[in-house]
Image (cartoon, rainbow, N blue to C red):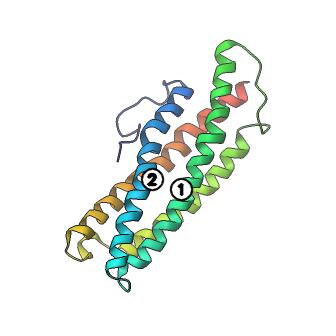
Amino acid sequence: MSEHPLAIGVDAARLPLDALCDQLVAGPHASMHAAVPRIRSRLAALAAREPEGPATGLQAAFSELATRLLAHLAKVENILFPAVTALVDAERSGRARPALAFPTVVHPIRVLEAEHERLLAALAAVEALRGEPSQAPPDDAWHTVQNDLTAFHADLAAHVHFEAEVLFPRAIELDQRL
């Protein structure tokens, strides 16, 4: 999985907001989009191998998390980021605030923040079923899934933090300036 902009030292406060959105889509979002089917496939293989084993519950919990995450990313990429880009373009060119599908970016951001809470709860459910990596059955398939889930957890937690602490406040500030 890719490193998050905060983890690689990107100065998010200085990077233009539209460029930051592009970087998020190309990096962390693309990484999560790629990880979901890979992890789903690996969990499905484990669950098929042992239908009554621990992978079955973990597969269901991860599927719930993945569904929520993919819907969240779609909203960010198709609703918030185009609005932010339009606001950046207007500010950069000295034009008036563009017409958006909503009065301010605050509303979609509040929806996305609520989704963060649900994503973190779904992630906690996965982690509870996953247990400690050292408790996993000692085979390569389980080891691979554990590694995948560890990286996925870190990326998702960084994503939520980055949006809440950097992206959303900057988008609201920009919207208020116009």
| Mark 1 vs 2: CB contact within 8 A | yes
SS at badge 1: helix
Residue at the spot of label 2: 156
Q: Nearer the viewer, residue 148 or 118?
A: 148
Q: Nearer the viewer, residue 81 or 127?
A: 81
Please state which amino acid type lies under the numbered disc 1: Leu
| Relative side of 75 to 153, left or right | right
Residue 43: percent from left, percent from top? 37, 69
Residue at 63% x, 50% y is: 112
Residue at 54% x, 43% y is: 163
Residue 114: percent from left, percent from top? 64, 56
What distance separates the C-alpha of mark 1 from that of mark 2? Answer: 9 Å
Residue at 24% x, 77% y is: 137
Please state which amino acid type lies under the numbered disc 2: Leu
Residue at the spot of label 1: 69
| Mark whose residue sits in front, 1 or 2 | 1
**Does 95 appear above or below 46?**
above
**Does 66 appear above or below 21?**
below
Q: Nearer the viewer, residue 25 or 16?
A: 25
Q: Residue furthest top?
A: 94
Q: Quadrant of residue 10?
A: top left
Whether residue 153 is visible here, answered yes or no, is no
SS at badge 2: helix
The quarter of the picture where the C terminus appears is: top right
**Which dot marks residue 157?**
none
Q: Earlier in the sequence, mark 1 or mark 2?
A: 1
Residue 9: percent from left, percent from top? 36, 33
